[in-house]
């Protein structure tokens, strides 16, 4: 997954639907227990599509929280 890339693109106001598909399209290997977390960050990421950098700031707090949750889950699962 390339979820952190979405945050960088959002800061530039450049998130597209293709970026979402690239970041979340391949979930092979994601443990079933982690899928709700992946789905949450994908849902937040989808809100960034088509937003300019200023508009995206309204969603970056939610995105950062979802990314932190995903990172913590990956650390727990993979360690």
Image: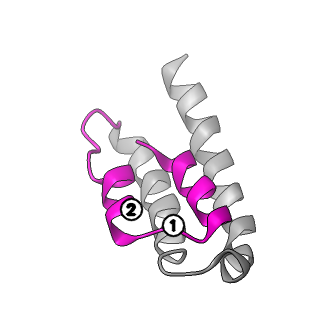
How many other residues sit within 10 Å of disc 1, few (<14), some (14-19) or many (≥20)?
many
Residue plotted at (51% across, 66% down): 45
Q: What secondary structure prevails in the magenta region?
A: helix
Q: Are marks 1 and 2 in contact (CB under 8 Å)?
A: yes
- Pinpoint residue 48: horizontal percent, then vertical percent: 54, 74
Q: Is residue 23 magenta?
A: yes
Q: Could you tell whether 76 is left or right of 34 in the image?
A: right
User: How far is the residue under mark 1 from the one under mark 2?
Assistant: 7 Å
Query: Which residue occupies the foreground of this view, 7 or 71?
Result: 7
- Pinpoint residue 53: horizontal percent, then vertical percent: 68, 74
Q: Is residue 22 magenta?
A: yes
> How many numbered dots are placed on residues in this image?
2
Element marked by disc 1: helix
- Identify residue for label 2: 20
**Residue 45's disc number:** 1
Q: Quadrant of residue 56?
A: bottom right
Q: How is the image coloured?
A: one colour
């Amino acid at each position: 997954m390339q979820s952190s890339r979405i945050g960088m693109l959002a800061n530039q106001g450049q998130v597209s639907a293709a970026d979402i598909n690239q970041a979340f399209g391949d979930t092979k290997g994601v443990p079933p227990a982690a899928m709700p977390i992946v789905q949450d960050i994908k849902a937040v990421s989808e809100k960034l599509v088509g937003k300019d950098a200023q508009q995206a700031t309204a969603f970056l707090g939610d995105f950062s929280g979802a990314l932190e949750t995903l990172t913590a889950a990956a650390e727990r699962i993979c360690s």
